[in-house]
Amino acid sequence: MLAWASAQIHCQFHASENRVALPPSDGSKHDVQAENETVFVPNRGERGQCILSTPPKILFCDLRLDPGESKSYSYCETLPVDGPPSFRGQSVKYVYKLTIGCQRVNSPIKLLRVPFRVLVLHGLKDYQFPQDEAVAPSNPFLEEEEGLKKDSRLADLATELLMVATSRRSLHLYNISNTRGKVGTFCIFKTVYKIGEDVIGTFSFSEGDIPCLQFSVSLQTEESIQEEFQRRRGQPVSFTVHARHQESCLHTAQSSFSLPIPLSSTPGFTTNIVSLKWRLHFEFVTSGESAGTCLVRGSQSEAVTWTGVEQMEVDTFSWDLPIKVLPTNPILASYVSQYSSTNSITI
């Protein structure tokens, strides 16, 4: 005999006490479930603050099951469009969970929490669908079907907007130089990507005045806390490296790199507390000598040996190129989840 079962979605916000100064949260904190309490509190006992929650929906009441009998129920909910994406950073975390609460008669409430991932694409909230179905008959009994059709069109629209935004290509050329002169040229065909894509760029050192000995490219995210929530004034931002390419390029005319954007990463976003941005971080090691960098050692015999110099004066400098990373199709993003999606609870 089950008294009731209910479901609700909520987003928990976690912040590092050493980096983020948050105002005190309103409301009382529930850590334990009373034995005789029948109130459904999905985030009971959870760390952090509940910044978003959907209205609870009752799955059933007064359900009696015979031995061996089973019944199934479906649950459907629409998430608010102004919520943050799922994110696990160094300073803050946004975690979404579906909580199922169930209670037997004269027994405490049992909670089952199922974490899931949320991707947010900005710009869909204010989109107006064209009135291309004005000739369709008006039927009040078709409201639910029309709503499902609109949700399907919204998903198709999001996919189309992502394809349009990330398929635009235009040549971007950047001259790489330091105080001594020109090192080379960097070429990239687009600066807007979606997670799962590869960031591809090429270098040309043939027209450089200063020889480049080595370069490295890192795909990084920059996590910065808004000024009013910083624990210390002017505290540094946090960087996370997702992919890196390093290559020795002495006497190399052209070179290239390809850095994959992990499907498990979070696209760039901004909330009232934190901002996440993507960038390419370049580091170059150049020679401080204008003469050749190799020595030739000969002997009286016909054999000639080429050896490198033992010491060399070098200069290093870095450069950051901001890029934009958008979400991808949720079906592709779900490929990184290899664990089973079945969860159970013992009542």
Image (cartoon, rainbow, N blue to C red):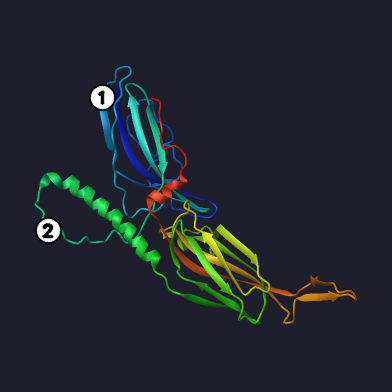
* 313 relative position to 284: left or right: right
| Residue 214: image location, x then y, percent | 66, 69
Residue 156, disc: none
Q: Quadrant of the N terminus?
A: top left
Q: Quadrant of the C terminus?
A: top left
Q: Is residue 346 visible?
A: yes
Determine the image quadrant of residue 311.
bottom right
Tell me which residue sits at (30%, 53%) in the image.
155
* 216 relative position to 166: left or right: right
**Residue lying furthest front:** 302
Q: Is residue 237 visible?
A: no
Image marks 1 and 2: residues in contact by CB distance under 8 Å: no
Above or below residue 251? Residue 153 is: above
Q: Give the class, few, some or many, for how many residues have Cα within 10 Å of label 1's Cα (few <14, many ≥20).
A: few
Residue type at mark 1: give it: Asp
Above or below residue 219? Residue 305 is: below
| Residue 122: image location, x then y, percent | 35, 60
**Residue lying furthest top:** 67
User: How many labels, in total?
Assistant: 2
Q: Which residue is mark 2?
A: 134
Question: Which mark sits nearer the N-terminus, 1 or 2?
Answer: 1
Q: Which residue is mark 1?
A: 62
* 227 relative position to 142: left or right: right
Q: Secondary structure at mark 2?
A: loop
Front residue (pair 129, 97): 129
* 296 relative position to 133: left or right: right
Tell me which residue sits at (44%, 47%) in the image.
335
| Residue 57: image location, x then y, percent | 27, 38
Q: Secondary structure at mark 1?
A: strand
Tell me which residue sits at (44%, 63%) in the image.
193
| Residue 118: image location, x then y, percent | 39, 49
Residue type at mark 2: give it: Ala
